[in-house]
Image: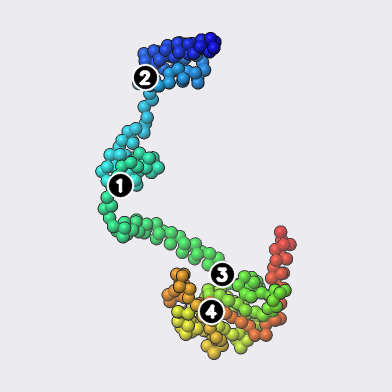
Amino acid sequence: MTAEMNRYADFEDLRAQAVALRREGFSLRQIRDRLKIFNSDLLQRLVKGEPPPEWTKRPNAKDDLRDRARKLRLQGMTYDQIRVELGCSKSSISLWVRDLPRPERKRTPDQASEIARRGWEPTMRRREEERRATKSAAAEEIGALSERELFLLGVGLYWAEGTKDKPHARRERVTFVNSDPGMVRVFSAWLDLLGVEPERRTYSLMIHETANVAEAERYWAELLGADPARFGKTTLKRHNPKTIRKNIGTEYRGCLVMRVLGSADLYRRIEGAWCGIVGAVASAD
């Protein structure tokens, strides 16, 4: 017990000396050197509760920015406006002024959206010009297609978008379904290349029940130069009231289903050609 009391007395004596030096304006380093105490934890305990002298405090470079940010916020400025004015981050501004009341909104949401839209217009026009230029340059690079190129393109197109035979469901018949006019035209040209007569081609639509079916059939028939009599029964898609349709308007014409009658042999040729393409790629690798 005596040893413990002695240690306590020694600590209190050291603390009294450290506090006295602290109040005289000594820094922690000066106290350390004066009392020969090189244990940082013990040194902190000795001066606990005693504020450091003013001369040891380093000025905070952001104190001025913080004060200015608060004044600007009280003037009704937004975070973005303060950021532009002071050149500091929005996260810092939020930390400095989050206890202050929000400024009253001076514009309606519609007015703010209109201002933002006008600000974005030059950028959107530039992006659209870049988009069109890139597409135009890519289109010019294609040039004319050889018969072999069209054949390979058609095989890949069918294997991506056409029905395929399965071991559990034999479907050795050519059926192509798509809503993109360009893809439909390319597939029709591919059938022309293979000598598939118009009489062997039949068509039908899969389309939403609220669409103009007659107008859609007329569009597809004109696009392909097909006889409207070749169109079969339309499949109508029922509307789910829980969903919001986005495929609406005059550009919506449903999906065109193109079938080739008596096409088992043609299907086998397509599948064989596709296997050949895959094999050629594997060989090249």
**CA–CA distance in space, label 1 to label 3:** 60 Å
Residue 102: assigned label: 1
* Secondary structure category for the residue under label 2: loop
Mark 4 = which residue? Answer: 206
Contact? badges 4 and 3 (CB < 8 Å): no
Judge by depth and name the residue closer to the eye, 6 or 111: 6
Q: Residue at the location (55% across, 86% down)?
A: 233
Q: Residue at the location (70% across, 63% down)?
A: 281
Note whether 3 is above or below 217 in the view shown: above
**CA–CA distance in space, label 1 to label 4:** 54 Å
Q: Residue at the location (33% across, 58% down)?
A: 113
Q: Amino acid at mark 1?
A: Arg
**CA–CA distance in space, label 1 to label 2:** 38 Å
* Secondary structure category for the residue under label 4: strand
Label whose residue precedes the other's in the sequence (2 or 3)? 2
Q: Position of residue 167 (x, y in %)?
A: 72, 74
Mark 3 = which residue? Answer: 143
